[in-house]
Image: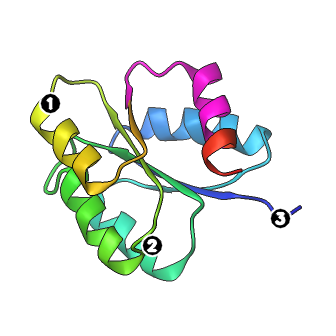
């Protein structure tokens, strides 16, 4: 069985390290990006089974990044993450086709189950 590849996009380095560690232990190939521009570059270079995208990031918010990467890979699976009440951005992301919204602090057990379900 081929390993599934996951991209985590978040400016919170501690969160990306924690998620990477957990998902790698579950057998996923994990790549991280600290901002939207880095995420766009990585999506152009590699295929990802799932992208975790923080909504609130400096320079470019996650919904804008999502719209841009959809132009590169139209059927890309993206799960948005946020620690803030940003309902307008959440609604926009869901209209764009995001698979869902995870609220921080993340429930890591649910997250692993979700990744396994979405990438199955």
Q: Is residue 112 magenta?
A: yes
Q: Residue at x 33, y 54 (%)?
A: 97
- 23 relative to 85, above or below: below
Q: Is residue 32 left or right of residue 22?
A: left
Q: Is residue 44 magenta?
A: no
Choose top left, top right, bottom left or bottom right for residue 23.
Answer: top right
Choose top left, top right, bottom left or bottom right for residue 80.
Answer: top left
Q: Residue at x 69, y 41 (%)?
A: 116
Viewer-nearest residue: 16 or 94: 94
The residue identified by callout 1 is 86
Q: Position of residue 41 (x, y in %)?
A: 38, 75
The residue identified by callout 3 is 2
Q: Residue at x 47, y 22 (%)?
A: 106
Choose top left, top right, bottom left or bottom right for residue 30.
Answer: bottom right
The residue identified by callout 2 is 43
Q: What span is colored magenta in the figure?
A: 102-115
Give the structural element (helix, strand or loop) at label 3.
loop
Give the structural element (helix, strand or loop) at label 1.
loop
Nearest to N terminus: mark 1 or mark 2: 2
Viewer-nearest residue: 28 or 11: 28
Q: Nearer the viewer, mark 2 or mark 3?
A: 3
**CA separation, marks 1 and 2?**
25 Å
The tally of labels here is 3
Viewer-nearest residue: 61 or 95: 95
Q: Position of residue 119 (x, y in %)?
A: 65, 51
- 72 relative to 48, above or below: below
In the picture, the disc for residue 16 is: none
């Amino acid at each position: 069985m081929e390993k599934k590849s996951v991209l985590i996009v978040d400016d919170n380095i501690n969160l990306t390290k924690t998620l990477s560690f957990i998902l790698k232990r579950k057998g996923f190939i994990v790549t991280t990006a600290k901002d939207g521009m880095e995420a766009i570059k990585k999506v152009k270079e590699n295929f990802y089974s799932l992208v975790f995208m923080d909504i609130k990031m400096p320079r470019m918010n996650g919904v804008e990044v999502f719209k841009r990467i959809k132009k590169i890979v139209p059927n890309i699976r993206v799960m948005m993450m946020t620690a803030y009440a940003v309902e307008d951005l959440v609604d926009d992301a869901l209209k764009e086709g995001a698979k869902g919204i995870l609220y921080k602090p993340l429930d890591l057990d649910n997250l692993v189950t979700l990744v396994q379900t979405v990438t199955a």
